[in-house]
Image: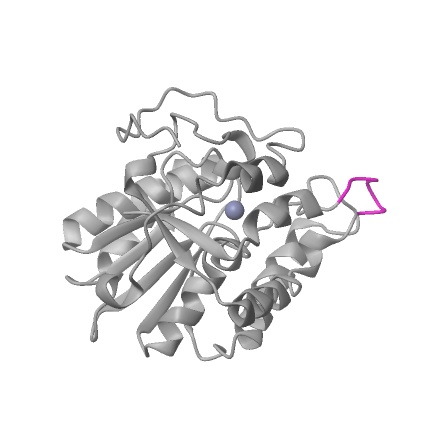
């Protein structure tokens, strides 16, 4: 593990293309499994609220399906802020036009939360345009600042995660958290695609590992299977699934990584 940077410098070069770094490379490296542990009880103490900022319907589960279970187990209040309804995942698809996605994908989130026994989770939808969050980041920041209270712990996609919506959501969440005296924790999702083991672009010194029991990992896997629109190939365009097995493997380790 190379941790000689924790500056989160924006040096570009975060391309999400091709199959990305094989999960076998991450597994063989061992650096992730050696990261310090995340103490959820210390991070989100009794009385504090966790606010999850998910750019797309599925990020809440891909990034923190284990954390959601840990929060529920310690009876923390959790609020999910859904930034977009995910209407742009199938461009030009006759089978999955934007209006269908905007209906179906939020329902998939609901089903996934139900699988975790978290059907009662409060969800607030910002309904910003999928793929264009950056242009509406001030709007998102304002909304978050109206929601956040001092002492909240905000879990948002990392500001340098590589996907424009993830980065814009992360920046808005960071600014809002600072303004509201809330704690910001960042979650990498697409980083595992473009980064490589020991990558100097990853802020390893801020990285913590949340261990998932086999039962929680199984439930996270079951919950991810609710995102049908993202898991199936699209015969109307001939495109493969948005979330192929190579992507899921990287996000179904027996731990989740967070940047403090
Ligand atoms: Zn996303």
Q: Which residues are magenta?
A: 234-240
> In this view of the protein, can residue 155 be seen by the observer?
yes
x and y, in percent, of residue 144 in the image: 28, 55
Name the residue located 51 percent from the left edge and 38 percent from the top edge. 192
Report if residue 132 is visible in the image: no
Q: Residue at x 49, y 67 (%)?
A: 213
Tell me where residue 204 appears, x and y as whole percent: 34, 36
Answer with left or right where residue 119 lies relative to residue 172.
right
Residue at point 85%, 47% (across, down):
235
The residue that appears at 48% across and 37% down in the rendered structure is: 191
Say if 73 sits above or below 169 in the image.
Answer: below
Counting the numbered discs, the total is 0
Occupied quadrant, residue 115: bottom right
Q: Main secondary structure of the magenta part?
A: loop
Taking the magenta stretch, the answer to whether it contains residue 104 is: no
Q: Looking at the picture, does residue 46 appear above or below residue 189?
A: below
Direction from residue 53 to residue 48 in the image, left or right = left
Q: Position of residue 190 (x, y in %)?
A: 51, 39
Above/below status of 214 relative to 190: below
């Amino acid at each position: 593990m190379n941790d000689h940077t924790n500056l989160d410098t924006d040096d570009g070069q975060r391309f999400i293309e091709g199959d990305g770094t094989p999960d076998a490379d991450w597994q063989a490296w061992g650096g992730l499994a050696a990261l310090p542990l995340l103490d959820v009880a210390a991070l989100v103490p009794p009385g504090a609220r966790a606010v999850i900022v998910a750019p797309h319907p599925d990020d809440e589960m891909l990034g923190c399906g284990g954390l959601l279970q840990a929060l529920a187990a310690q009876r923390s209040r959790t609020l999910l802020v859904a930034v977009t309804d995910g209407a742009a995942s199938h461009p030009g698809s006759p089978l999955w036009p934007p209006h269908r996605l905007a209906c179906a994908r939020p329902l998939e989130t609901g089903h996934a939360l139900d699988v975790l026994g978290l059907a009662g989770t409060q969800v607030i939808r910002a309904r910003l345009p999928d793929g264009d969050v950056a242009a509406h980041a001030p709007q998102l920041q304002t909304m978050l600042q109206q929601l956040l209270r001092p002492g909240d712990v905000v879990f948002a996609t990392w500001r340098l995660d590589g996907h424009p919506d993830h980065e814009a959501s992360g920046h808005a969440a960071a600014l809002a958290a600072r303004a509201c005296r809330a704690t910001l924790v960042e979650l990498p999702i697409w980083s595992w695609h473009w980064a490589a083991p020991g990558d100097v672009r990853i802020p390893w010194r801020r990285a913590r590992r949340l261990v998932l029991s086999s039962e929680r990992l199984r439930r996270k896997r079951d919950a991810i299977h609710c995102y049908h629109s993202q898991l199936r190939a699209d015969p109307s365009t001939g495109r493969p699934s948005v979330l192929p097995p190579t992507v899921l493997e990287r996000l179904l380790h027996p731990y989740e990584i967070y940047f403090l």
